[in-house]
Image (spheres, rainbow, N blue to C red):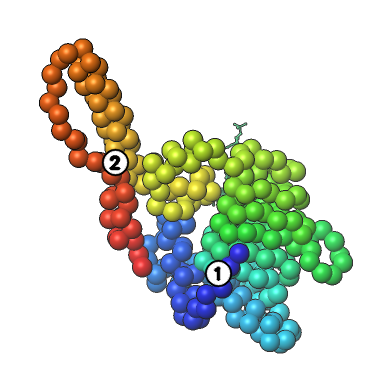
Amino acid sequence: MSEMRKLSVWQRFKEDIYCVFERDPAARNVFEIVTTYPGVHALTAHRISHWFWQKNWKWFARFLSTIARWLTGIEIHPGAKIGRRFFIDHGMGVVIGETAEIGDDCTLYHGVTLGGTSWKGGKRHPTLENDVVVGAGAKVLGPITVHAGARVGSNAVVVKDVEEKATVVGIPGRVVRAQKSQDEKAKEKLAQSVGFDAYGTSNQTPDPVASAIHGLIEHIHITDKRVEQLCQTIRQLGGQVPEGEMPELDGCELDKERDQTKVD
Ligand SMILES: CC(C)(COP(=O)(O)OP(=O)(O)OC[C@H]1O[C@@H](n2cnc3c(N)ncnc32)[C@H](O)[C@@H]1OP(=O)(O)O)[C@@H](O)C(=O)NCCC(=O)NCCS
C-alpha cells in the first residue's frame, strides 16, 4: 500500500496533478488540469477534509466533503484512506465510502462506487491495492480486496476479492484475464511501455514510435540469431565466413532517453 516516505503537502499536490498526464491523453498542461479536472479538485478537497477528520473535527470534515461533492459530483467520505497519485477521471457520480482504502497509483472513472453492503459499523468498504483501475460505472462492494494491478471493467459489480493483475468484468464480476503468463510479461518488457494505459486496456501505454522501434529491434535480434546459425552451419560444412562479433543492440538505451524526457 501507500509508501511511508514523508512528503510535503506541496509535493503530494504536485504528484496528484502530474499523474494526470500519464493517465489522460487529453491533459495538455498543468493550468488546464488544476482548473478543469473535477477529480483533482475532489481529491484536493479530500486531502484537506481527511486531515480534519483525523484531527477529530468530524463535522467540519464532512461539511468540506459535502461542499466538494456539490462542486464536483464526487462524494468521498473524509474517513477514506487514499494513497499517492490517485486520479478520478471525469468523476461525476463517484462514491467512496468511509472505510474504503486506496493504494498508490489507482484510477477510477465516473460512476464508480466503492461501497458497503452492510449497515453495521467497522470495515465495510473495499480496499484497492496499488495500481488498480476501476472502469466507468463499476461498483466494488463490501470489505473485499482488489489486489495490486487488477482492473475492473466498466459497469462490473464486484463483490469478491480480485487477485493480483486480474481483469474482472460483468455482473457479478468474473475474471476474464488472470495474472499474465511469463511469456506475456517477457513480451511486454520487450514491447516497452511509457507507464499507464488510459482506460485500463492494458498496463502498458502504446507509444506508437517506441513500439515500432522496439518491434524493429526484436526483429533484428531474431534476424541476427538466424544469421549466426547460418554462419555456424556454413563453417561446419567447410565454408569460410568472416569472424567478428556484431555490436549488441540494446532497446534499453531508448528507454533511458525516453525516461529523461518525461516530466519530472
Ligand atoms: C475490462 C477492461 C479493462 C478490459 O480490457 P482488455 O484487457 O483490453 O480486455 P478485452 O477488451 O480484450 O476484453 C476481454 C474480454 O472481456 C470482455 N469485456 C471487456 N470489457 C468488458 C466490460 N466492461 N463488461 C463486460 N465484458 C467486457 C470482452 O468482450 C472480452 O470478452 P471475450 O474474451 O469473450 O471476447 C476494459 O474493457 C474496460 O472496461 N476498461 C475501462 C474503460 C473505461 O471505463 N473507460 C471510461 C473512459 S471515459
Disc 1 on helix, strand or loop?
loop
Task: Report the amino acid beneath label 2.
Answer: Ile
Task: Report the amino acid beneath label 1.
Answer: Glu
> Which of labels 1 and 2 is toward the front?
1
Q: Nearer the viewer, residue 242 or 200?
A: 242
Going 56% across and 64% down the picture, which residue do you hit?
104
Q: Which residue is mark 2?
A: 213
Q: Quadrant of ligand 1?
A: top right
Where 181 sits versus 135, above or below? above
Inter-mark Cα distance, 1 to 2: 34 Å
Q: Nearer the viewer, residue 218 or 224?
A: 224
Q: Looking at the image, can residue 223 be seen?
A: no
Total marks placed: 2
Badge 1, how many Cα within 10 Å: few under 14, some, many 20+? few
Q: Looking at the image, can residue 189 be seen?
A: yes
Using residue 171 as the reference point, say whether residue 204 is left or right of it. Answer: left
Look at the image and tell me in which quarter the C terminus lies.
bottom left
